[in-house]
Amino acid sequence: MSLMPILTLLPPALREPVARLPAELQKRAEELRIREGRPLEIVHSEGYAFVGPNGNPLGQAAGSCIPTREDCAKLLELLTRHSIYSYEEELKRGYITVEGGHRVGLAGRTVLEESRVKQIRDVSGFNIRIAREVTGCGRKVLPHIMDYGERNVHHTLIVSPPQHGKTTMIRDLARMISSGEWPEAGFAGGRKVGIVDERSEIAAGVRGVPRFDVGPRTDVMDGCPKSEGMIMMIRSMSPEVLVADEIGRPEDAYAIHEAVHAGIRVIATAHGSSLEDALRRPVLRELAEDRVFRRVVVLRKGPGGVSVESVSEIE
């Protein structure tokens, strides 16, 4: 896969050198980092490189492309479709999700209102995280979380540091569960899956229609806060399995309890380098103490890709 899907997001001065990057490097690209007045950087599966004017990857900053203030202003215009005001909520949270599920983190000078961030003004830093499908990666996890007695999956929490494959993993798990790809399970048939896709990263929805393959029996609540979306799914779509990314707020815990009490299996993710690290967060500790999750899977990314570091069974 090339970087073609994100090239249309870039102003010409940045688009041309990025498009000329070696094909092999484009396939391994994970992030494109654009900082005003500083070197253009690409982060890939084996490290990082700075981008030269002709698309040549450089090990040092000297001689690399330097995005200007005008480049950054044009980039923000393209990301917000020339209507910054319609993206006020996203700007306040520090990111924009664009078509294709690519998430663009933002940095710059903040404007405060009553000690809270009202918006980011003078955006000078962008991190374009490149979303990709990895069909079949869920086979590493699904056998560990299957509930053979109930012919379903256990309530599962998937933990990893940022950029270690959580979102990619739950996307493929949703696809497998929905389509009935149960490895060596001895039973057939997919389950009704509901995805609450607050940042439009799991399904990459466009006008509510998923662009990634999330399975034939999957419904997606796109661009909706997780807590509200989970409650709406429970009431309206009767899922058998509910999927949500990056939980951590008290209202998330309430919605998960509601799903569990309704007999719906939950697969969720959270940031953390280990189970112990994740449980330092009050909301996750509360869910653990209530024994909501029966399986906790810790992912780790290494030279060979994402692997399962550990699986904890909580009975």
Image (cartoon, rainbow, N blue to C red):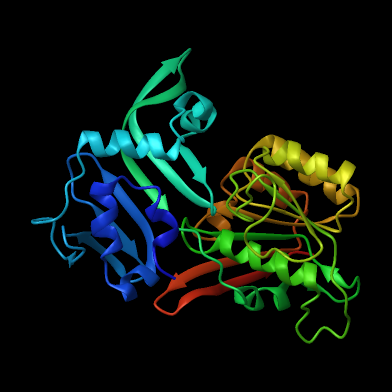
Instruction: Give the answer, above or below, for where 188 lies relative to 122.
Output: below
**Which residue is drawn at the image coordinates 82% and 45% (left, top)?**
233
Residue closer to the observer: 291 or 145: 145
Judge left or right: residue 37 versus residue 150: left
Q: Residue furthest top?
A: 114
Q: Residue furthest left?
A: 62
Residue closer to the observer: 111 or 91: 91
Judge left or right: residue 290 versus residue 70: right
**Residue 194 image-quadrant placement:** bottom right
User: Can residue 313 be seen by looking at this rendering?
Assistant: no
Residue closer to the observer: 241 or 289: 241
On-image quarter of the C terminus: bottom right
On-image quarter of the N terminus: bottom left
Instruction: Give the answer, above or below, for where 38 lies relative to 74.
Output: below
**Which residue is drawn at the image coordinates 87% and 86% (left, top)?**
186
List x then y, in percent, for residue 140: 62, 77
User: Can residue 15 be seen by looking at this rendering?
Assistant: yes
List x then y, in percent, for residue 66: 17, 47
Judge left or right: residue 282 versus residue 112: right
Residue closer to the observer: 177 or 287: 177
List x then y, in percent, for residue 216: 78, 66
Q: How many marks?
A: 0
**Which residue is drawn at the image coordinates 72% and 38% (left, top)?**
227
Instruction: Give the answer, above or below, for where 260 lies relative to 42.
Output: above
**Which residue is drawn at the image coordinates 45% and 23% (left, top)?**
117
Judge left or right: residue 290 versus residue 108: right
List x then y, in percent, for residue 262: 91, 49
